[in-house]
Amino acid sequence: MKTAKIISVAQSEQVGLYTICFNGEESEFQKFREKFKANASLNKDYKEILYALDRIIAKGAFERNFRYEGKANDKVAALSVYSKVLRLYCLRISDQILIVGNGGVKTTRTYQEDPELNGYVIDLQKFDELLAEAQINGTITIERNIITGIEEATFTL
């Protein structure tokens, strides 16, 4: 059983950028960054993803920046339009709220065929459900680019 917390990565007038920490470990986004920052063969793709995140923080988490993954009723998306093989999986809550997860190199036709990528998507799908429940029961609220109540909230997956 996993526990998860949301932490803020960056705030701007346009976007609140958040990430997930499982079981008190470093954040999923930090794991992604550590995994690819020194990888010379993927450096261009890695920098494109970071640049895209900078643009998103400045302008908004618009749908055109993402490729929806997962199921039709969840908010799991991949920030991959700027990269040919590297995927960063996210929960695109709105144009103003983005929760970044982890990602990896897509070497298969679909993410479901890769156990690592499939695991990242499944975790985000479960977390998306829990986040929706927390909004319904009032544990957290989302207003514009801020998620209120996340500092105290812990989710069990």
Image (tube, rainbow, N blue to C red):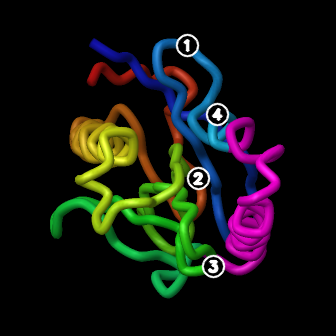
What separation in Å lies between label 3 and label 4 (alpha carbons)?
A: 20 Å
The image quadrant that residue 110 belongs to is bottom left
Identify the disc placed on residue 31. Answer: 4
The image quadrant that residue 153 belongs to is top left
Quick check: marks 3 and 1 in contact, CB under 8 Å?
no
Q: Is residue 52 visible?
A: yes
Q: Position of residue 95 (x, y in %)?
A: 51, 74
Q: Which residue is mark 3?
A: 82
Q: Position of residue 25 (x, y in %)?
A: 58, 16
**Is residue 34 a member of the stretch shown in magenta?**
yes
Mark 3 residue element: loop
Disc 2 versus disc 3: nearer the observer: 3
What separation in Å lies between label 2 and label 3 (alpha carbons)?
A: 26 Å
Using a 10 Å C-alpha cutoff, classify the residue at mark 4 as few (fewer than 14 neighbours), some (14 to 19) or many (20 or more): some
Query: Reading the chain from its start, which is encountered first: label 2 or label 3?
Result: 3
Question: Quarter holding the N terminus?
Answer: top left
Mark 4 residue element: helix
Identify the disc placed on residue 146. Answer: 2
Q: Which residues are magenta?
A: 33-60
What separation in Å lies between label 3 and label 1 (alpha carbons)?
A: 31 Å
Using a 10 Å C-alpha cutoff, classify the residue at mark 2 as few (fewer than 14 neighbours), some (14 to 19) or many (20 or more): some
Quick check: marks 4 and 1 in contact, CB under 8 Å?
no
Q: Which residue is mark 1?
A: 24
Query: Reading the chain from its start, which is encountered first: label 2 or label 1?
Result: 1
User: Which amino acid type corresponds to the residue marked 4 in the rendered image?
Assistant: Lys
The residue shown at (64%, 34%) is: 31
The residue shown at (25%, 53%) is: 113
Query: Reading the chain from its start, which is encountered first: label 3 or label 1?
Result: 1
What separation in Å lies between label 4 and label 2 (alpha carbons)?
A: 23 Å
The residue shown at (57%, 75%) is: 84
